[in-house]
Structure formats: C-alpha cells, structure tokens
Image: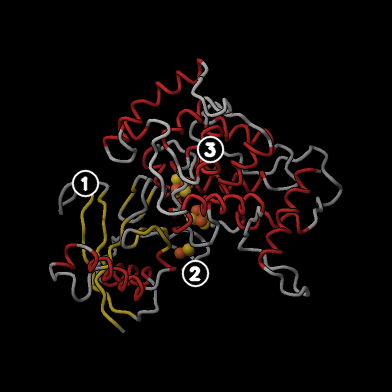
Amino acid sequence: MAEYTLRVRRQKPEADDRGPAGPYWEEFEVELDPTLSVLDGLLQAKDRQDGSLGVRCSCRAAICGSCGVKINGQSTLACLTQIGEAQERANRLARETDAGADGDGDGNQPIVVEPMGNMPVIKDLVTDMESTHWKKIRRVTPWLIDDGNPPERERIVPPETMVDITQTIACIQCGACVSSCLSMEADPDFIGPAALAKAYRFVGDPRDVDTEARLNDLAQDPHGIYDCTHCFSCVDACPKGVAPMDQIMRLRRLAGHDHDIDDRNNGRRHETAFVKIIEKKGTLDESLLLQESYAQGIKGKLKPSKAAIKGLLGSLPTAIRGIKTGKMRSLPKLIPGIHPKLPGDAQDHVKRIYKHAEEHREELNLYISGVEDDEPAEVGASAETTVENAEERRDS
Ligand code: SF4
Ligand code: SF4
Ligand code: FES
C-alpha cells in the first residue's frame, strides 16, 4: 500500500453553500496498491471522503469507454492508468518544470486529474459526450449502406477483406482522442478523430456501397479530413491502438489519390504540394508552398489562376501571423531560391527516404495476427498482404 494525493479539477454546476458555480481544485489523500488504477483511487475518495465527487465508470477494465479523463495532462482512461505509474509521471513532470528546478519538485507530487478536453463539463470529471462526441459520430453515417438486395442469409465476405478495418472496429468510443485533438481546440466544428476513424470503418468495409459519396462528403467538408494537422495527439491518447490519425490519412489517400476527388478546401492540392516539394528539394521550402498549393503544375513558375490569386490573398493574414509567431520564416527567406540548405547531405538523405517510401507502400495494421495455423508472418509480408487485399477489394 502507498499514499497518493489526487488533485482533482472539480466543477460545480450550481452555486451552493461552499461557493459559486464553476471550476475549482480539491485534493484527496488515498491509500492503495501502486498496481491499482487512478479510477480505484477516485472511487476510494468518493467512497470515504466525498460522495458528491462526480466520476463516470462502469466496467473498470478498459472495455466500456466510460472513464475518460486527463491524468497529468494526458487524455486517457482512468481505469487503465496504474496509480503508481501516474505518480512517477507527476514527479517527472514536476522535475522538468520550474518547480523541479527550485527544489519544490522533490518528493511525491499530486497526481492531477481533470475532465476531458474539447467537451463541456457536466459535473466534476463527467463531460457531455453527446454534444461533441456522439453528434460527430452520427455526422459520418455510422452504419453500413448495402446494395439494397438483402441476401437470404448473411452477407459473407472473405475474412481477409475485413483485416483493413479491424483497427477501427476496436474503438470503444471513450473520446480520449477527441479530448486531446489540437485541431478541435482551434476548430470545434472539426469532425474529429473518433468520428473519422468510424468513417473509415465503413469506407473500408467491402459490403458498403457508398464509398465514393462518403469520401466526397468528408473531403469537401471544410471541417473534414483536411482539417487534421497530423499532430499525433490522438494516436498517443487512444487506449485501444486505433490510431485515428492513421485512419484519417487512409481516408485522404483514398479520396485524393485513389478516387481523384478535388476538394474545394484545396486540401488535396496543399498535401500534394508538400509531397512534391519534399521530393524535389529534400526539405520543406515554405516559399514554394503557397505557390504550389494554389498554382500547381506550372513547372515551378508562379503563374497563378484567378482562383489561385484569391487563395493566395486569402492566405496572407495566416502567413503574417506565422511570421510574427516565428512559425514561418521571415519575408526575405520566403523568396523562392534562397531557402537555406540543410547541413551536409541531409537533403539527399531525405530524397532517398522519399524514394524508398514511394517504392514500398506499406501499411502496418496492429491487429493483423494471421490465421491460427499459419506460420507466423513477417511484419512486412503481413502489411503488403493487407495493402494487396485492400487494393484488390477497391478494384473489384
Ligand atoms: S492527428 Fe489530427 S485528428 Fe489526431 S489529434 Fe492531431 S489534429 Fe486531431
Ligand atoms: S479512437 Fe481510441 S481514443 Fe478515440 S474514441 Fe476510439 S478508442 Fe477512444
Ligand atoms: S470503466 Fe470502462 S473503460 Fe474505464
């Protein structure tokens, strides 16, 4: 047994004799084995100290998806996080901050528990999943659209054609990815990682007949697949290995590459511009990015169309903000041709990596394990089989 301090961000929905409505912090001392979970600690605090502490849970085994919270700033499941490990992380974070440098970070630090982000808080650690998570899930038509000719019995598909979507099927709808999504912080209308992973579950299903319409819808929506900034937060947060960002990238590849969908958000062209610049230069020359995004395919010369000029002008405020905040290079360095070179032969290395990636399109699906009687497959071989299966399915 060990003692821990849980520093919980609580939220009072209404004013009461303890003060006005709103958020406040409260600390609870709990005593339990380090291998037990943060959820066990919260339930002990609720049981022994304050029965009004709001926390949602059911299975206590990382299955139902009810207990999503932020622990030490990381969105996750409270029942899946061992309290001993949470303590170590709290201590490490304190050592890495000023508190640690001042010496205040010595000893055990409180484990910080907060409600999930990007969602309204109902009470304490209980968030409103309906207004953000479930609404967005419904947005992507989360059911199978079949060909309208129901078979006498079930629709039978070869098991290998389902491998491609097993990763998304593993989602337990906990909302941890939504809570951690940086794009959603900036654009609350972004469809978001959980719903887009769900969308791939049906786009990748061989029985669904609406693939083209689904992809077109998600590509044309200004808050759709091109709104993701590829930040990996949802991949880190997901407790079930769904890797929502990977599913979004699959949707993008299907939309832009395989189905040739030219979206009105310029997302596909912007993405192609990144790839083209890296291929040619081995580094991201931002001076070419706007030009290539809006006036692609004119042999590197800036001869933008009317729409391109409109797009370029529309991007100016963003560019100025980028320069001011140091995210983009200063104006002189934006002039094509004077982009600084990477040291040594780093750019040639990047070009070689690019070439290798082009020649070896591999998708690693964590849930591929093969058939029981099979020889254990090599990872590369499984991945290639998956791609072949997916491609065969799409071609048929
Ligand atoms: S990778 Fe995309 S979907 Fe995932 S958290 Fe970042 S912005 Fe959101
Ligand atoms: S994708 Fe992962 S983090 Fe997101 S809702 Fe599903 S299980 Fe939770
Ligand atoms: S209580 Fe079910 S996932 Fe944590």
Asked whether mark 2 lies closer than 8 Å to ligand 3, one says yes
Q: Which residue type does callout 2 highlight?
A: Ala
Horizontal side of 110 relative to 256 (left or right) equals: left
Q: Residue at x 29, y 64 (%)?
A: 51
Q: Determine whether the residue tagged by mark 3 lies in a helix, strand or loop.
A: helix
Label drawn at residue 61:
2
Seen as rendered, the residue at the extreme right is 152
Q: Which residue type does callout 3 highlight?
A: Glu
Q: Quadrant of the N terminus?
A: bottom left
Q: What x and y, as percent, mark residue 294?
A: 50, 26
Question: Residue 50 versus residue 334: which sits nearer the camera?
Answer: 334
Q: Residue at x 51, y 18 (%)?
A: 307
Q: Residue at x 80, y 56 (%)?
A: 158
Seen as rendered, the residue at the extreme left is 102
Which is nearer the N-term, disc 2 or disc 1? 1
Q: Residues within 10 Å of mark 1 (few under 14, many from 20)?
A: few
Q: Determine whether the residue tagged by mark 1 lies in a helix, strand or loop.
A: loop
Q: Residue at x 12, y 67 (%)?
A: 102
Asked whether mark 3 lies closer than 8 Å to ligand 1, one says no
Q: Is residue 203 visible?
A: yes
Q: What x and y, as percent, mark residue 87?
A: 30, 72
Q: Residues within 10 Å of mark 3 (few under 14, many from 20)?
A: some
Where is mark 3, residue-wise?
A: 271
Where is mark 1, residue-wise?
A: 21
Question: Residue 94 versus residue 299: which sits nearer the camera?
Answer: 299
Q: Residues within 10 Å of mark 2 (few under 14, many from 20)?
A: few
Which is nearer the N-term, disc 3 or disc 2? 2
User: CA–CA distance between discs 2 and 1?
Assistant: 33 Å
User: CA–CA distance between discs 3 and 2?
Assistant: 40 Å
Q: What x and y, as percent, mark residue 292?
A: 51, 30
